[in-house]
Image (cartoon, rainbow, N blue to C red):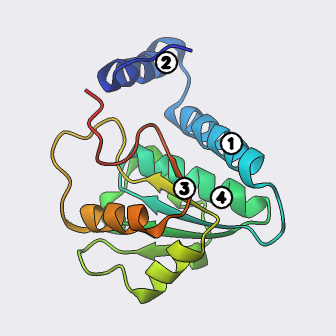
Amino acid sequence: MRVVTAHTMQEIDKRTIKEFGIPGLTLMENAGRSCVDEIIAEFGLKGSNRAVILAGKGNNGGDGYVIARLLSQKGWSVKVFILAEREQISGDAAANLDKLASNMINFCPHEGQLTALHIEEIYQADVIVDALLGTGLRSDVDGVYLEAIQLVNASGRPILSVDIPSGIHGT
């Protein structure tokens, strides 16, 4: 296995799409499927499994939407808390968001919108998927993103981060 910087990984993704003609949707599907394989290997398929996906507006969030869809297809109870407005999500991420059942999705774009109901779901989850911020993070985390990260870290629940834990700079 090779370890690369966030910048190098972004360049690899761009080249894969541009030079090899592999669509971004395919990359997103493959990333999501790999994460689901790891989740199933760790937690199994009990029929009562619960997952909370915390998703942002970018491609990291798009990976989270794929994970939510695939876990749901395997019988997991899945809740997706999106820390953005619907209109902020575009491209491949929006295409994958559109594939989710509406009863799985909660939009929480503003600080203070993670309510007791969200907190209860997080604390009852078998696994929390961190699909908030990926390798493109360029500034310090604040607002609803910081609120969510602190809440998840305090929950004591197992966390699977897509690409890199949110809030960590990959440089």
Whole-percent x, y for residue 63 in the image: 52, 46
Q: Residues within 10 Å of mark 4 (few under 14, many from 20)?
A: many
**Secondary structure under the numbered disc 1 in the rendered image:** helix
Q: Residues within 10 Å of mark 3 (few under 14, many from 20)?
A: many
Three-letter code, disc 1: Glu
- Tell me whether circle 1 and circle 2 mark residues in contact (CB < 8 Å): no
For label 1, the residue is: 38
Q: Residue at x 64, y 65 (%)?
A: 126
Q: Residue at x 38, y 85 (%)?
A: 115
Judged by depth in the image, the label closer to the viewer, 3 or 2, is 3
For label 4, the residue is: 69
Q: Nearer the viewer, residue 153 or 91?
A: 153
- Tell me whether circle 3 and circle 2 mark residues in contact (CB < 8 Å): no
Q: Residues within 10 Å of mark 2 (few under 14, many from 20)?
A: some
Whole-percent x, y for residue 59 in the image: 42, 44
**Secondary structure under the numbered disc 4 in the rendered image:** helix
Q: Which mark is residue 16?
A: 2
Three-letter code, disc 4: Arg
Whole-percent x, y for residue 69 in the image: 65, 58
Q: CA distance from mark 3 to mark 2?
A: 21 Å
Judged by depth in the image, the label closer to the viewer, 1 or 4, is 1
* First of labels 1, 2 by sequence position: 2
